[in-house]
Amino acid sequence: MPSSAPANPSDLEQQLADLKAELLETQKMAAIGELASTTTHEFNNLLTTILNYAKMGLRHTDDATRTRALEKILSAGTRAEKITNSVLGMARNRGANAAPTNLADLAGETLVLLERELAKYRVQVETDIQTDRRAMVVGAQIQQVLINLLTNARQAMTQGGRILVRVAEDPQSGTVDLTVRDNGPGIAPEHLPKIFEHRFSTKSGPDASGKGGAGVGLSACKEIIENHGGRIRVESTVGRGAAFILKLPAVAEQAAAPTAVKRLGVPA
Ligand SMILES: Nc1ncnc2c1ncn2[C@@H]1O[C@H](COP(=O)(O)OP(=O)(O)OP(=O)(O)O)[C@@H](O)[C@H]1O
Ligand SMILES: [Mg+2]
């Protein structure tokens, strides 16, 4: 007699669903932890800039030097404000329920958080926003998908390159489409059918920033997008680049405005 009864298939399915949910949660926490550490680091650098220029302004009494110091302080302060707003945006998007979300804003906030890392690897980002129609999504989850896609694109372009983030409406499918396109090496045709599989990776291990190689990024993206009733698709041309297209359910009317969120800011 076996010591335990054979597992019944619906129990196994439940266990699998629980494990998948746990995996997504772990990935989310890892992404947040990583962003918290890079943004804190950047914040600290900005603070150093502000303090140094404030000291310079106090030391020198001529107008030209003081003006230059104030300009540097203003520009560092503005960048710090953007970062704070994006981190607050992340906290605001952490709700577990889908809500009408402006994907361009979400992409903008995500890019602010990754800007420094992308610049470090000489990756330029352009955005092409074609619509302000909102999509019905769990903001934090789509942000996680974006972080995975942007990180993959950055890692593929070892010599630097360009990423285009595009938001457009597809009236035929009733979706808002979010595309992340890079001009890196693209994906080998024999790898293409496997890239969304759990644990598929062509990377030998984490890169210098500690990211990549587990082969869980795209499978998590697929899971999240499909849970939203959306679709994720890839286009790739070897030598020209890869594009990941997310099709997410559009919100039918623009009528109901989202709750206004007070932004931090210096009065103009
Ligand atoms: N933009 C891209 N350009 C070229 N290849 C890509 C791109 N995005 C994904 N890939 C390929 O798809 C594979 C799977 O990606 P996925 O994000 O799932 O795993 P990973 O990046 O290797 O590891 P991690 O779990 O850390 O994300 C990658 O190893 C890479 O070969
Ligand atoms: Mg990845």
Image (tube, rainbow, N blue to C red):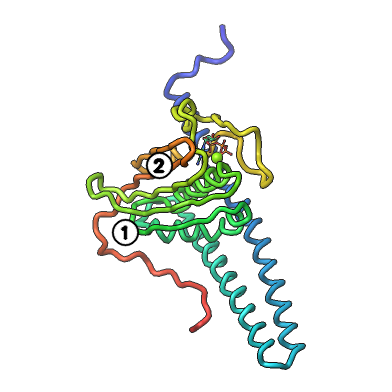
Label placed on residue 225: 2
Percent position of residue 111, x then y: 51, 57
Out of 163 and 223, give the one closest to the viewer. 163
Residue bearing mark 1: 131
Neighbor class of circle 1 (other Cα within 10 Å; few <14, some 14-19, many 20+) is some
Residue 119, picture quadrant = bottom right
Closest to the observer, 209 or 186:
186
| Amino acid on which the number 1 mark rests in the picture | Thr
Q: Position of residue 258 (x, y in %)?
A: 35, 64
Q: Which residue is drawn at 51% across and 76% down?
A: 265
Q: In this view, does 133 lie above or below 174?
A: below
Earlier in the chain: of badge 1 and badge 2, it is 1
Q: Is mark 2 on a helix, strand or loop?
A: helix
Task: Give me the disc on residue 23.
Answer: none
Residue at the (53%, 56%) spot, across then down: 124
Q: Which residue is farthest left? A: 172
Where is the N terminus found, in terms of image quarters?
top right
Q: Residue 192 in the image: x percent, y percent?
A: 45, 30
Q: Could one spot residue 14 in this view of the protein? A: no
Evaluate if marks 1 and 2 touch, with contact meaning CB atoms under 8 Å apart: no
